[in-house]
Image (spheres, rainbow, N blue to C red):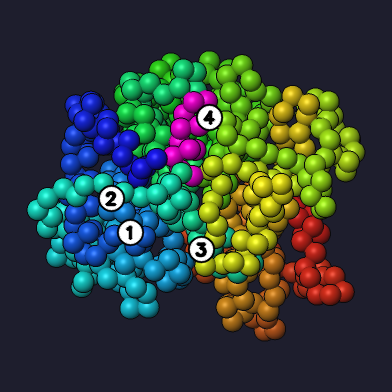
Amino acid sequence: MANLVADVAETAADRPDATAIGFRGRTWSYAEFWSETGRLAQALADRGVGADDRVALYLPNLPQYVTGFHATLRAGGVVVPMNPQYKTREIGHLLDDSGATVVLTLADLAPMVTEVEAETDVEHVVAVGGDDADLPEGATSYREFLASADDELDVVDRADDDVACQPYTSGTTGQPKGVMLTHRNLASNARSTGSLMPGGFDPDDKMLGVLPLFHIYGMTVTMLGTLFNGAAYYPMSEWDAQEAVDLIESEDITIVHGVPAMYNDLVNQPNAEEFDLSSVRFANSGGSSLPIEVMRRFEDLYDVDLFEGYGLTETSPVTHANRPDERRAGSIGRAIPGVESMVVNDEFEELPPVERGPVEEGTDLDAVTGELVVAGPNVMRGYYGLPEANEEAFTERDGTRWFHTGDIAYRDEDGYYFVVDREKHMINTAGYNVYPREVEELLFEHDDVADAAVVGIPDERRGETVKAFVVPAPDADVTPDEIREYCLERLAEYKHPREVEFVDVLPRTTTGKVQKFELRGSNE
């Protein structure tokens, strides 16, 4: 296999006039898209970007993100996706750790990049949109950067196991970790997930690109899957239920991928019964567990089957999925083609399946639940520069390299898997991962906070939301709302505590560990 973007070159040659991207009434043919990608790749190469050099994409879902992603790989580089909701303190670590030399960002976000530029290896800041005169010193407009290239760079050859993308995911402790995903990882997952639909991808398919491209689900399953197969990708820069439906109806969108909160929003709109989703032939949910009731309401309203899958950043992402004629409510489905999976105990012994899932309430799951581990061509090469974390993440057994997902699950005799809990304290809110330690570290920086703990609590729309329990410092003059605003100013919106409760003391064990199960229990 060559550089994974070479597939797009073949489509551009075979079907140059076919639509590659549609955005706000404008379309880019495959010929136009591939040509712009080539010029951007040349501009990157002219600035020294080559094999294994990192280029950070700090953008919402825009055509320039798609172009920047493919141009970076075309030049032989490695994409470092960054959430456009991140603030200076968050992007500073990602840029410093990755060693990115170029950042492609929005004009409005460029000042945050230039603020940390001196502390990183960043040499070039390229800004999309805005007035050139308003760009911070040292930043270059996307138009000027693209125009500087006098040719289109050929696709740089890369090996299967060369790193293509380095998204970041947090652990329960420490800073976010760079996940090294190879050309083989991403290509195998894009192909496998595309095959799950009835008949696979069709060149006439149109994908709703509402999932954020910095997130592995949106990047692989929607963007790469679509362009790999010569279909059309329609990005949306932010989620809005009515705008999504308008786009589906106006463009006859055929494929929809989303997270449960999005489907919940759709079915709870006041005019939900008026939406016309008749063009949609396949809809899927991932990112977090899909409530069965949301699935049923969506299917009843629109006569479109809604499937559920499962995956992680480290697995590119999909490992399990329900398929047409092969699904089970409450299950993450069966392993996708090429992926192996097991449920193991602490001794890494495979646990026996139940006869048929889901099991009845009150069933003792101790004998059948364990950690879900997976193996396959989609599993990451490893965490960037973290040998100890890699040692913990993998177990080698009989020549197979198994990845520990950290999720507790069971399976049934038909091969369906059911995730029942998370081994770690990670909070999953509307498909985004929030790690309590990061929020807690920020809380401890506040002068009026003496102690703090962060947990996930049930939320009807998001599945979970973030709650902070705070012990105020003696004589502190601060309110819960002020603590919330303090976090919101310094963290991405979805990470900040939507609820803050002041307490006199946090429950702790004799060794000093916070008993978070007690804090969660106080909200039940």
Front label number (4 vs 2): 2
Give amino acid for label 2.
Answer: Val
Q: Position of residue 381 (x, y in %)?
A: 53, 54
Q: Which residue is mark 2?
A: 156
Q: Is residue 23 left or right of residue 393?
A: left
Q: Earlier in the sequence, mark 4 or mark 2?
A: 2
Disc number lying in front (1 or 4) = 1
Alpha-carbon span between mark 3 and mark 1: 16 Å
- Give the amino acid at mark 3: Tyr
Q: Is residue 140 above or below residue 16?
A: below
Image point (75%, 47%), residue name: 371
Distance in Å between CA atoms under marks 3 and 2: 22 Å
Q: Position of residue 422 (x, y in %)?
A: 71, 49
Pair 3/2: label in front: 2
Q: Secondary structure at mark 3?
A: loop
Q: Which residue is mark 3?
A: 384
Range shown magenta: 185-196
Q: Main secondary structure of the magenta part?
A: helix
The local secondary structure at tag 4 comes to: strand
Residue 41 colored in magenta in the image? no
Which residue is denoted by mark 4 in the rendering?
A: 284
In primary-sequence order, the first of circles 4 and 3 is: 4
Which corner quadrant of the image does residue 1 belong to? top left
Label 4, label 2: how many angstroms apart (C-alpha)?
Answer: 34 Å
